Amino acid sequence: AEVKRGGRVAITEERGEGSRVMCAAPSQAGSGEPGRERYVRVFEACDEDKKGYLSREDFKVAVVMLFGYKPSKVEVDSVMASVQQKNSGVLLEEFLKLMSTKKAAQLHHSEIRQIFTAFDMQYRGFLTLEDFKRAFNSIAPKLPERIIVEAFREVDQDSDGHVSFKEFESAMNYGQNEVSQLHFA
């Protein structure tokens, strides 16, 4: 099995005179195809021998096909360790749950990025107290300034007078049942 560049992923099988493409698909997730059906199609394409599960290598190729990046060793180790007590690899139902969770985390991260960008009117890559005041005044004009200042100080974890995206994201995720960071760091 090998991963090829150029926006497409291919799994090849070596056979005598050359190689034969076993499965190939666009590597980016935005195909418009509904999630579950696309996940099933990718699972089936990557389950080369129709064994009913994805091996470690199969799983890596599937993630590339769906999300456009090669998962880290830590991510793959974590997924494989969570499923291999019972099986030889990732079964379809487990794969569907993992990919749905991963997609939800990706969408959540994207939404937070959009909110941060809307607050960062100067495109500096960080937020100041003035950015916070401007944003809060537009969405909650009657909110007392002291509340806005307290919120800013709370979010500005390192007290440098700037709120980085990481600090902003941490505040936005505070108190939520976060998607497992174990599988998708």
Image (cartoon, rainbow, N blue to C red):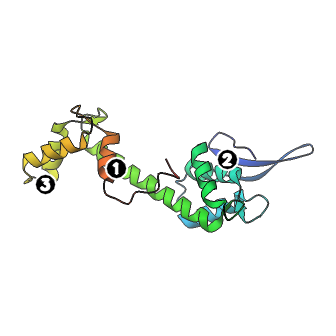
Furthest-right residue in view? 16
Q: Classify 159 as above or below 60.
A: above
Mark 2, other Cα within 10 Å: few <14 / some 14–19 / many ≥20: many
Whole-percent x, y for residue 72 in the image: 58, 43
Mark 2 and mark 3 lie on one chain; the one further toward the N terminus is 2
- In this view, the residue in front, 180 or 162, is 180
Q: Is residue 33 visible?
A: no
Residue designated by label 2: 9
Is residue 148 shown left or right of residue 1? left
Q: Is residue 57 visible?
A: yes
Residue beneath the point at 52% across and 54% down: 30
Amino acid type for the residue under numbered disc 2: Val
* Mark 2: secondary structure: strand
Amino acid type for the residue under numbered disc 3: Ala
Residue beneath the point at 58% across and 64% down: 96
Q: Nearer the viewer, mark 2 or mark 1?
A: 1
Q: Classify 153 as above or below 21.
A: above
Whole-percent x, y for residue 26 in the image: 62, 50
Amino acid type for the residue under numbered disc 1: Ile
Disc on res. 89: none
Residue designated by label 3: 140
Q: Alpha-carbon distance for marks 2 and 3?
A: 47 Å
* Mark 3: secondary structure: loop
Q: Quadrant of residue 97?
A: bottom right
Disc on res. 112: 1
Q: Alpha-carbon distance for marks 3 and 1?
A: 19 Å
Residue beneath the point at 16% across and 53% down: 139
**Tag 2 near tag 1, CB within 8 Å:** no
Q: Classify 21 as above or below 157.
A: below
